[in-house]
Image (tube, rainbow, N blue to C red):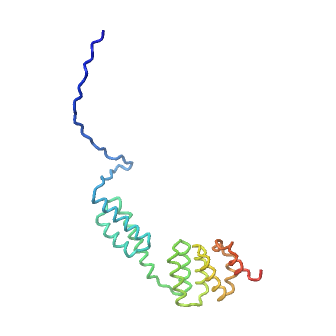
Amino acid sequence: MAPAKTPRTSKTTSTTVTTKSPRTLAGTVLPANDAARDKVLQEYQTAVTYMQQGNFSAAHPAFEQLLKDAPPEFTDRIRMYLSACISQADKGDAKFSSPEEQYDYAISLLNNGHFEDAREQLNNILQTDSSADYALYGLAVLASITGDAQTCLDKLTEAIRLQGRNRIQARADSDFQEMADDPRFTELLYPDA
């Protein structure tokens, strides 16, 4: 016969909970979250939001301030954003030797997806010369790409009125593909059909 087991009484033992550092591949351990780091991250997000909104005059000083207090893993990115802010500020100071050069610059902005900057440059050309059919044509392309059918038709109509060859150019221009199914667009390009 097996000896009777005596019930064990549970003893309260104190255990120390230790948190392990997160594992990293690069060998550096990220510091634990603290209030100062959270504040820097919030300011960083605000500065990035300014940039995304195109408000470079607000983003620039925000990034400069951040650079003083930022954790090391953010400094390269902050410097990159600062450089972009400076570059964008310099864009506004661009000087052109001719309206055609400004037009080429506007089209490069358009091709790179900087639609508002392109619109601003094209409108600046028109303020200088209201009969600049190429600027109107560029605004028509911009409107087509951004889905503004009525503006596209208005600007292209005016460009064609000023220079008839714009009609022929628009027929072959793939930038107007969004307008291809619009009967008003077809009527504008093929009035005799």
Residue 181, position as x, y percentages in the image: 69, 72
21 vs 186, nearest the viewer: 186
> Does residue 106 appear left or right of residue 7 in this picture?
right
Q: In which quarter of the image is the N terminus?
A: top left
Residue at left offset 34%, top offset 61%: 41
Q: Is residue 127 shown above or below 114?
A: below
Q: Is residue 91 shown above or below 49?
A: below
Residue at left offset 33%, top offset 70%: 64
Residue at left offset 22%, top offset 30%: 11
> Does residue 15 appear left or right of residue 107 in this picture?
left
Residue 129, position as x, y percentages in the image: 55, 90
Q: Residue furthest top?
A: 1
118 vs 72, nearest the viewer: 118
Q: Is residue 24 shown above or below 70?
A: above
Q: Residue furthest right?
A: 193
Residue 190, position as x, y percentages in the image: 73, 80
Residue 65, position as x, y percentages in the image: 31, 69
Q: Quadrant of the C terminus?
A: bottom right
Number of callouts: 0
Within the image, what quadrant is residue 143 found in?
A: bottom right
182 vs 175, nearest the viewer: 182
> Does residue 158 appear left or right of residue 128 in this picture?
right
